[in-house]
């Protein structure tokens, strides 16, 4: 994720589908695997947008970058068939 905090915007699950070229037949499983993670990432982005303290912004930015990486790793594992059993609570 970019270091320029002005460029950081909330992301959708669909955005990750497009960025990571998720095939149509894998989208449902990926959706179940990353929905909660994307929600938490976006909560942090909202927090970053409101934060004025530079040190806290740096801390939140680091968390955002880590969450983005985790989402990408999760998608990759699912696409490689290493995602394990995913259950989704409705």
Image (spheres, grey):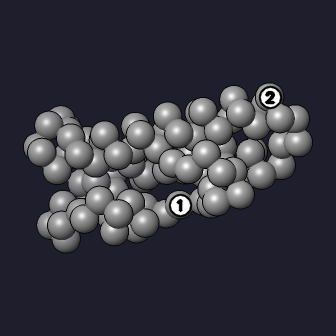
User: Residue drawn 23% across and 46% down?
Assistant: 76
Q: Is residue 61 visible?
A: yes
User: Residue drawn 40% across and 68% down?
Assistant: 14
Q: Is residue 40 visible?
A: no
User: Residue drawn 34% across and 57% down?
Assistant: 31
Give the image quarter of residue 85: top left
* Circle 1/circle 2 CB separation < 8 Å: no
Q: Residues within 10 Å of mark 2 (few under 14, many from 20)?
A: few
Task: Say above or below: 30 vs 41.
Answer: below
Give the image quarter of residue 59: top right
Task: Say above or below: 71 vs 56.
Answer: below
Position of residue 57 in the picture relative to residue 87 (left or right): right
Give the image quarter of residue 80: top left
Farthest-out residue, left: 81
Numbered disc 1: secondary structure: loop
Residue beneath disc 2: 55
- Count of numbered tags: 2
Q: Which label's residue is closer to the chain start, 1 or 2?
A: 1
> Whole-percent x and y of residue 12?
49, 63
Position of residue 20 in the picture relative to residue 48 (left or right): left
Q: Nearer the viewer, residue 20 or 87?
A: 20
> Whole-percent x and y of residue 43?
65, 47
Residue beneath disc 1: 11
Camera-near label (1 vs 2) is: 2
> Whole-percent x and y of residue 37?
47, 44
Numbered disc 2: secondary structure: helix
Farthest-out residue, right: 52
């Amino acid at each position: 994720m970019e270091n320029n905090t002005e460029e950081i915007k909330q992301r959708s699950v669909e955005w990750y589908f497009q960025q990571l070229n998720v095939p149509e037949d894998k989208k449902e499983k990926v959706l179940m695997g990353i929905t909660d993670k994307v929600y938490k990432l976006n909560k942090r982005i909202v927090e970053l947008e409101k934060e004025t303290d530079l040190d806290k912004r740096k801390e939140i930015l680091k968390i955002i970058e880590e969450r983005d990486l985790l989402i990408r790793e999760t998608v990759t594992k699912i696409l490689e068939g290493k995602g394990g059993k995913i259950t989704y609570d409705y």
